[in-house]
Image: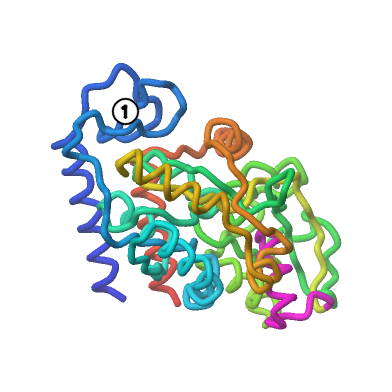
Amino acid sequence: MKNRTVASVLAIAALSFAASAFAQECKSRGDLDAMYCDDNGDMVADVPKDPKKLKNPNTIVFTYTPVEDPAVYEKIFKPFTDHLAQCTAKKVVFYQVQSNAAEIEAMRSGRLHVGGFSTGPTAFAVNIAGAVPFGIKGYEKDYQGYNLIVVVKASSPFQKLSDLKGKKVAHTAPSSNSGHMAPMALFPKEGLAPDKDYKILFSGKHDQSILGVGTGDYDAAAVASDVFHRMGTRGQIKESDYRIIYRSAKFPTSSFAYAHDLEPAFRDKMLKCFYDYRFTEEMKKAFDGADRFFPINYKEHWSVVRQVSEAGGEKFNREAYEKETKREEEAKKKK
């Protein structure tokens, strides 16, 4: 674990050096890192102007956000990755990532071409790794969303957020929207101030927070509603063993994003493969009935996430990313 932490810190230092060495001259950059430009104002990295920097990979590397066991999702996405391989006439491999930081660093370094990012880390992926969100799991007429919920044991005495003062409350990871940033912004209005009324305990993942409430390691946990319900559907938990004492407004669920430097003709072909695909019954069961990749764009559909971040005093810049990556590693060390 110590070696992994050192490796993470070294990777961050290397990325910082790369950012300064390859900073671009831009008319506009917005919140993007120095490696990227946003001259058209859509809040995501522009396609490189130099043709030599465009990528048309022989093997497409795909992944999905590590909110739960990555091996589970490799199996669930197998019918889709087979479809993507046939549709693009390229080899497709599923890359198992163990943390949000690892996924973001993989795209930034060019090792990851397309993948699903959790709601909060999507903004870091956009600004730090040049990710371009294009889809959300959804239905014919709308995209799939989720709520921040707070779960407690059904047998517990807790009925509202203010009852949790001085209790053991789990957050997931610093970069998580529902697992940390939304609670920081929304809980104070409900009479509960994180890090003041209780000490934040980072579990690492949504499923670990939920299971921790079940075992008594935590009195309550702030998690994504879709993860909670999926665990119930799979039989990992009995939802009746828990009680939801808080539910927020709807947030977009995990985004699917591609690397900004993909060759446009290849990129467009790949996107058509995504949009034309219809989920298998197993995928629909795993993703709460969603049956397709619903088209979205970052500027419009992630505005509510950015608003929550700003309200909570959080940013999605390099300084915040490096800070939260270190905090994520520290949370792992304590396990």
Report the residue at 53% width, 31% height from top: 299
Magenta stretch: residue 79 in it?
no
Q: Depth check: 333 or 100 in front?
A: 100
Residue in view at x 46 percent, y 69 percent: 82
Residue 235 or residue 288, whichever sits in front: 288
Left or right of 92, for residue 251: right
Residue 290 location (% of width, % of height): 69, 58
Q: Counting other residues with Cα less than 10 Å from the Cα at mark 1, is it few (<14), some (14-19), or many (20 or more)?
A: many
| Relative to 38, residue 268 above or below | below
Quarter of the figure that contains the N terminus: bottom left
Amino acid type of the residue that numbered disc 1 sits on in the rendered structure: Cys
Q: Residue 120's spot in the image, x, y percent?
A: 53, 48
Magenta stretch containing residue 233, yes or no?
yes
At x 66%, y 53%, the residue is 197
Q: Position of residue 18 (x, y in %)?
A: 17, 43
Report the residue marked by disc 1. 37
- Looking at the picture, does residue 177 appear above or below residue 210? above
What is the magenta range? 221-240
Quadrant the C terminus occupies: bottom left
Of 280 and 230, nearer the camera is: 280
Q: Position of residue 123 (x, y in %)?
A: 47, 42
